Image (cartoon, rainbow, N blue to C red):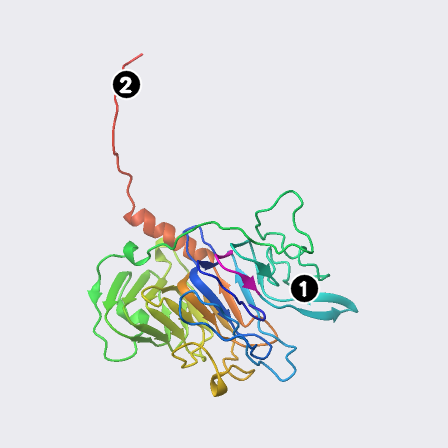
């Protein structure tokens, strides 16, 4: 998100909420920003953690990376605090920043981020925080939003789904080098692979009819774009889909598109959108982000689930990161449910004839 997301309290953050209950982040969201590091240090003793992680993106500090969430909501049991930028367009002051297409549900406070896509397109024609909170939920009386009110304080008490449980079992993966997801199946069908340790995913174009589920106890490093074939598709069960379930998922800086379900599951449950080589995720010295580090924009097409999501991209001139819940994720999930679902009779009761 634009600026920073800080003071994330104990609980759950969700980036985008699908019909199937995914695109969730449990813990905290950490974002590259356009200012200098503040004096408050990053706390990494617990997840979720308090975060005031700001990084230099250019010398002037005017141009700031932003995040856009398409087709979903943002949910968190902490705070969402992002900065905004004011620029004149045709001599009219407008406000720009990160935005969510639909709702924001947070148990803490919301600052900066726009719900209902209020900061999209030409920006907001005013600086009022209430005007950009049209779909930001809040527990309040009928006075609603005021300039003195911190919007938010809405706890939906939602837990994370166990995606791995939906794909039980699986064959052990024999790994001698980088994995190409499409090559795990020679023809259509569903592949469920398990691995103890780390994996590297090289670039792949997943062909029609292939569903690849990868479950590993270690770290999955994505070194190349993960995309789906363009089709055409004869039916929804031909839609390809890649599901990555790992303790940590790290996307290298050269990657610009990931079509996949990103599930950070395990003791750490961390997703990082640009590899910084920091074991603690606290950046200092040469590790700090700049306008030339992690500068390529990234688009993730699919759900995200994690305990902590580190949004590292610093691209300017557009959103640094887009999290897009496309219709193919819904349609593929429906195809999976139709293929494996069932209606079970639990009891019957015969009624007398009338």
In the rendered view, tell whether residue 226 sits above or below residue 125. below
- CA gap between label 2 and label 1 equals 63 Å
Q: Nearer the viewer, residue 17 or 265?
A: 265
Instruction: Indicate left or right for 125 with 245 as reference.
Output: right
Stretch in magenta: 73-81
In the rendered view, tell whether residue 38 sits above or below residue 171. below
The image shows a total of numbered marks equal to 2
Per the image, the residue denoted by label 1 is 123
| Residue located at (61% from left, 60% from top) | 114
Classify the position of the N terminus by image quarter.
bottom right
Q: Residue furthest top?
A: 354
Residue 42: x %, y % from top left:
48, 74
| Residue located at (33% from left, 60% from top) | 209
Residue 191 belongs to the span the image colors magenta = no
Classify the position of the C terminus by image quarter.
top left
Observer able to see residue 107: yes
| Residue located at (64% from left, 68% from top) | 84
Q: Secondary structure at mark 1?
A: loop
Per the image, the residue denoted by label 2 is 351
Label 1 CA crowd tier, 10 Å (few <14, some 14–19, many 20+): some
Quadrant of the image occupied by residue 130: bottom right
Tags 2 and 1 touching, CB below 8 Å: no
Q: Residue furthest bottom?
A: 286
Q: Nearer the viewer, residue 124 or 229?
A: 124
Instruction: Indicate left or right for 318 with 195 as reference.
Output: right
Instruction: Indicate left or right for 279 with 41 as reference.
Output: left
Residue 294: x %, y % from top left:
49, 80
Q: Secondary structure at mark 2?
A: loop
| Residue located at (20% from left, 73% from top) | 174
Q: Which mark is residue 252?
A: none
């Amino acid at each position: 998100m634009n600026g920073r997301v800080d003071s994330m309290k104990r609980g759950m953050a969700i980036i985008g909420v699908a019909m199937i209950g995914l695109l969730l982040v449990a813990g905290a969201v950490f974002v590259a920003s356009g200012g200098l590091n503040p004096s408050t240090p990053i706390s990494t003793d617990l997840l979720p953690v308090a975060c005031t992680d700001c990084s230099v993106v250019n010398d002037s500090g005017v141009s700031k990376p932003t995040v856009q969430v398409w087709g979903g909501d943002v949910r968190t049991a902490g705070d969402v605090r992002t900065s905004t930028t004011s620029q004149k367009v045709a001599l009219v002051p407008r406000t720009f920043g990160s935005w969510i297409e639909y709702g924001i549900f947070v148990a803490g406070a919301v600052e900066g981020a726009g719900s209902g896509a209020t900061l999209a397109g030409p920006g907001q024609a005013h600086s009022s925080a209430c005007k950009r909170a049209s779909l930001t939920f809040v527990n309040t009386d009928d006075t609603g939003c005021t300039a003195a009110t911190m919007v938010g304080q809405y706890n939906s008490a939602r837990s994370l789904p166990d995606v791995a449980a939906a794909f039980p079992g699986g064959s052990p993966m024999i790994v001698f080098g980088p994995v190409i997801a499409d090559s795990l199946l020679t023809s259509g069908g569903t592949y469920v692979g398990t691995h103890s340790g780390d994996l590297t995913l090289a670039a792949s174009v997943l062909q029609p009819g292939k569903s690849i589920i990868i479950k590993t106890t270690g770290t999955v490093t994505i070194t190349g774009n993960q995309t789906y074939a363009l089709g055409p598709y004869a039916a929804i069960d031909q839609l390809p889909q890649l599901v990555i379930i790992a303790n940590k998922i790290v996307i290298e800086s050269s990657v610009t598109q990931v079509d996949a379900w990103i599930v950070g599951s395990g003791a750490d449950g961390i997703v990082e959108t640009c590899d910084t080589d920091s074991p603690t995720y606290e950046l200092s010295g040469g590790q700090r982000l700049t306008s030339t580090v992690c500068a390529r924009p990234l688009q993730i097409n699919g759900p995200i689930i994690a305990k902590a999501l580190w949004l590292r991209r610093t691209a300017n001139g557009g959103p640094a990161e887009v999290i897009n819940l496309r219709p193919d994720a819904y349609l593929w999930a429906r195809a999976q449910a139709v293929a494996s679902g069932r209606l079970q009779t639990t009891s019957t009761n015969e009624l007398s004839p009338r």
